[in-house]
Amino acid sequence: MEITIALVGFGNVGQALARLVDAKNPALRENYGLNISITGVSTGRHGCAIDSYGVDISRMLEAIEQTGSVSGMHSGKPIIDTPDFIRRVPAEIIVETMPLNPESGQPALDYLRLALHHKRHIVTANKGPVAFAYQELKSLARQHNCAFLFESTVMDGTPIFNLVRATLPLIDIQRVRGILNSTTNSILSRMETGMSFENALQEMQQAGIAETNPSYDVDGWDAAVKITILANVFMHARLTPHDVNRTGIGALTVDDVQAALRAGQVIKLVCEARYEHGAVTASVKPVALPVSDPLAQVRGTENIVSLETDMISRITISEGEAGPTATAYGCLVDIINIARGYR
Ligand SMILES: NC(=O)c1ccc[n+]([C@@H]2O[C@H](COP(=O)([O-])OP(=O)(O)OC[C@H]3O[C@@H](n4cnc5c(N)ncnc54)[C@H](OP(=O)(O)O)[C@@H]3O)[C@@H](O)[C@H]2O)c1
């Protein structure tokens, strides 16, 4: 069976997904009788291309590397913009990997609405639309008999949403805690060794780990967006990132971090969502955790999430260092699930 996908966003994750599709198609055919064909790519400033027969992935990657644009791979009526692309591309699934807008989820949110109105399944690695409109996108998808999957939005490709959906039916998740932002966790790990906050942040920026706008990490925005998603998906809350009680790590000093260590504690930027007085509340704030807490063990760019439930007291899943390939893998898993009938 042929499954057609279109990539909205062709940066680190979009390109990693294209490489993964190219590398894994033989195994997909062998194991699942599936072949993924990429019928279009849309970017912000690097052009768009549609090829209803399926693009040549190596040529597409070469084009963007050598010419900085994919437009040379397009023939036919010019594509005006991404909405025009979404309307016209002959793809069953739109895979959206655009940059995060933590204040509104836009414009990606409108693009996903448009895709659903055109009866396309959607897969996204972008946290914004899920954090701001999970319930709406879910019901829109249901209305159009489409799938809406977003495994890579939290902890890259580590299967937390699939884990709960596929293996924990009827579970009641009462509390979620996690360390979900790699930049702040790495900064805090470095401050434990005596490095200043400013130098640690600079190292993260040089390594390409920190967001372009460091406030998204340091002030807890990225973490707030992620805990919003977990609260809305796992606890049926209707929060937006603006509802999260948020404190970043900018006011912490090396002395604070090292004093905590001497007291047998580790300071972490902890995300939490819990039922309180009949409603779900969420927070992101630095917390001094006892070293015995599983969340205290997570170093550098590793992430962790811990679910407290009515059936199994605690389920904890942690992720080693990740990157665009792990994120692209989460998208690939979503695509395979849709191809196998998940709605
Ligand atoms: N990198 C990771 O490991 C990782 C992990 C988890 C989640 N994510 C999430 O995945 C998403 C993608 O991350 P990334 O690292 O791949 O980002 P990126 O390298 O900045 O790529 C973003 C892509 O989106 C395109 N884009 C921007 N505006 C667009 C528009 N209006 N229409 C179509 N395309 C548009 C960009 O095109 P131009 O370059 O031409 O503007 C670029 O191709 C983000 O939301 C990120 O938070 C990433």
Image (cartoon, rainbow, N blue to C red):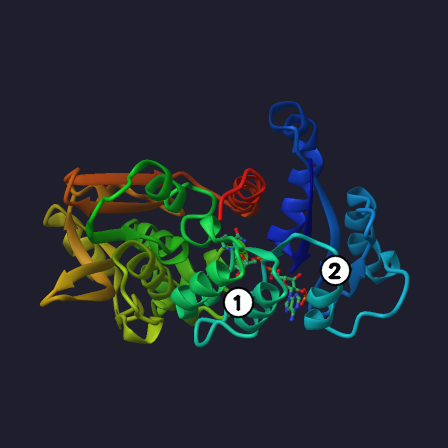
Percent x, y for residue 69? 80, 61
Whether residue 136 appears in this view of the structure is yes
Q: Amino acid at mark 2?
A: Val
Please name whichever residue, 229 or 183, is drawn nearer the observer in this view of the structure. 229
Q: Is residue 154 left or right of residue 260?
A: right
Q: Is residue 91 left or right of residue 297?
A: right
Mark 1 and mark 2: span between their CA atoms? 31 Å
Q: Quadrant of residue 339?
A: top right
Q: Quadrant of residue 338?
A: top right
Q: Please, what secondary structure does the residue beneath circle 2 have?
A: loop
| CB-based contact (under 8 Å), mark 1 and mark 2 | no
Q: Residue at x 31, y 39 (%)?
A: 317
Up-down: is 60 above or below 20?
below
Q: Residue at x 40, y 38 (%)?
A: 320
Ligand 1 image-quadrant field:
bottom right
* Residue found at the far top of this picture: 30
Dot 1, how many residues are within 10 Å of its Cα: few (below 14), some (14-19), or many (20+)? few
The N terminus: image quadrant: top right
Percent x, y for residue 118? 63, 65
Sequence-earlier tag: 1 or 2: 2
Q: Is residue 135 left or right of residue 82?
A: left
Q: Is mark 2 within 8 Å of ligand 1?
A: no
Callout in the foreground (1, 2): 2
Percent x, y for residue 314? 18, 40
Whether residue 198 appears in this view of the structure is no
**Label disc, if present, on residue 212 of the rendered structure:** 1
Q: Please, what secondary structure does the residue beneath circle 1 have?
A: loop
Percent x, y for residue 144? 54, 61
Q: Which residue is mark 2?
A: 89
Q: Amino acid at mark 1?
A: Thr
Please name whichever residue, 203 or 165, is drawn nearer the observer in this view of the structure. 165
